[in-house]
Amino acid sequence: PKGGCYNRRRCFMLERELYSALENTADAAFVVDEQGITRSWNRAAEKLFGLPASEVVDQPCAGLLLGKSPLGTPVCTEHCSIIECAVKHREISNYDLEVDGHRGESLWVNISIMVFHEDRTGRTLVVHLARDISERKKKEVLTEKFVQLAREIAAQSDDSRQISEGVHGQ
């Protein structure tokens, strides 16, 4: 029957296989169930986020990373829109997330999502693959500052030209 597992041990083994496969990824990988509980946290996640698996697994994911969008909007909340989309079989695009780094500094990561639906149990697992994009974000901020400076210089140049034309035109 839907929502039940014919062989609970087999379903448990499939999940363990997923966790084991993720352990060998270069990207930080962690798995969250449909209730928002962290079920797996690989070594790369330990390294990137500075949190050992022993402190993370079986804990609500919302309070772990305290992630925010590029506009500063909280993303990691008790009512997670990512999990909601996963459960409803909606497409989830990759996204950038600012998290509190383990050294007290801000860390930017790009997150890709894979969803694992276990039809026999009705369980949904949401795999998060994260990679550090902090350097890219620093370059984006620097580029934006240069663009703003160029606009200010262009505006001053236009103002100077108008003043000069006004003086010479009299």
Image (cartoon, rainbow, N blue to C red):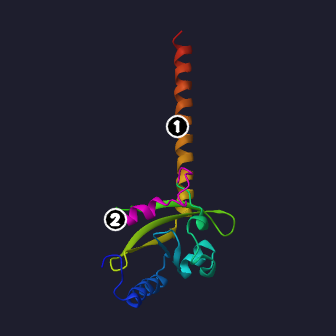
Give me the disc on residue 89: 2
What residue is at 42 percent from the left and 61 percent from the top?
84
Q: Quadrant of the N terminus?
A: bottom left
Whether residue 11 is situated above or below residue 129 in the rendered picture:
below
- The residue lying furthest to the top in this view is 170
What residue is at 40 percent from the left and 87 percent from the top?
8
Q: Which residues are magenta?
A: 70-89
Label 1 Cα crowd, 10 Å radius (few <14 / some 14-19 / many 20+): few
Distance from Cα at disc 2 to Cα at disc 1: 44 Å
Magenta stretch: includes residue 87: yes
Circle 1 residue: 151
Magenta stretch: includes residue 35: no
163, 19: nearer the viewer: 19
Disc on the earlier residue, 2 or 1: 2
Quarter occupied by residue 94: bottom left
Q: Amino acid at mark 2?
A: His
What residue is at 53 percent from the left and 24 percent from the top?
161
Residue 6, image x, y percentages: 33, 86
Circle nearer the viewer, 2 or 1: 2
58, 93: nearer the viewer: 58
Q: Amino acid at mark 1?
A: Arg
Whether residue 16 is situated above or below residue 45 in the rendered picture:
below
Whether residue 164 is situated above or below residue 6 in the rendered picture:
above
Residue 115, image x, y percentages: 38, 71
In the image: residue 117, left or right of residue 156: left
Question: Which element is circle 2 on?
Answer: loop
Residue 44, image x, y percentages: 54, 79
